[in-house]
Amino acid sequence: MGLKESKKYAIGSIHENGGGKFEITDRWFDEETDTIMLKYKFLEGGKVEVNKEANVTASEWKWRKVRGLAGKASLVQTATIETGIIPKEEMEEKFTDLTERFDKGLKAIMENKSNILHLQESHDAQQKLLNEMMSVIKVQQKQIEALVNDRNIINKLLEKI
């Protein structure tokens, strides 16, 4: 069984997990266990480890998830950051831009909250007015019923006269 070349785990590529940053030094297919294996060296300390590719992937994913970096867009950003393609200044600029966008979004949310509270107050006032009108209508309905009853009595009296 031939092993296809990996773009993600190419020899010399840099990755990071809970143990720190490491560089891939070798990748092969272990026929005894039917798994792809990785040999990598940590940049700090130079410790060399061998592990299954799936375990390394899971370890990286868990490390990114804990830091809120997991997801399709963040995978691209993380890969470019690890390989040093994006300069620090550009990342700071992006962070500043995201912070500003977050602040604008928060401001919009607060304005919407204010508008919602205003609408709630208006709704409550209209509900109160509606309840008062219903009370007046009930009183008027009783008065109308009394007038109709009185009219019926007058009509009966007139018939007897």
Image (spheres, rainbow, N blue to C red):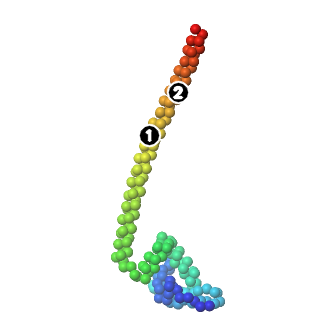
Along the viewing direction, whichever of 151 and 122 lies nearer the viewer: 151
Q: Is residue 103 visible?
A: yes
Along the viewing direction, whichever of 146 and 91 lies nearer the viewer: 146
Residue beneath label 2, please? 141
Residue 46: x %, y % from top left? 47, 88
Q: Which amino acid is tagged 1?
A: Ala
Q: Which amino acid is tagged 2?
A: Gln
Residue 50: x %, y % from top left? 56, 87
Along the viewing direction, whichever of 51 and 144 lies nearer the viewer: 144
Q: Nearer the viewer, mark 2 or mark 1?
A: 2
Q: Which image quadrant: the N terminus?
A: bottom right
- Disc with the residue nearer the chain's start (2 vs 1): 1
Mark 2 lies on a secondary structure that is helix
The residue sitting at the right extreme is 32
Q: Residue at x 57, y 80 (%)?
A: 55
Residue beneath label 1, please? 125
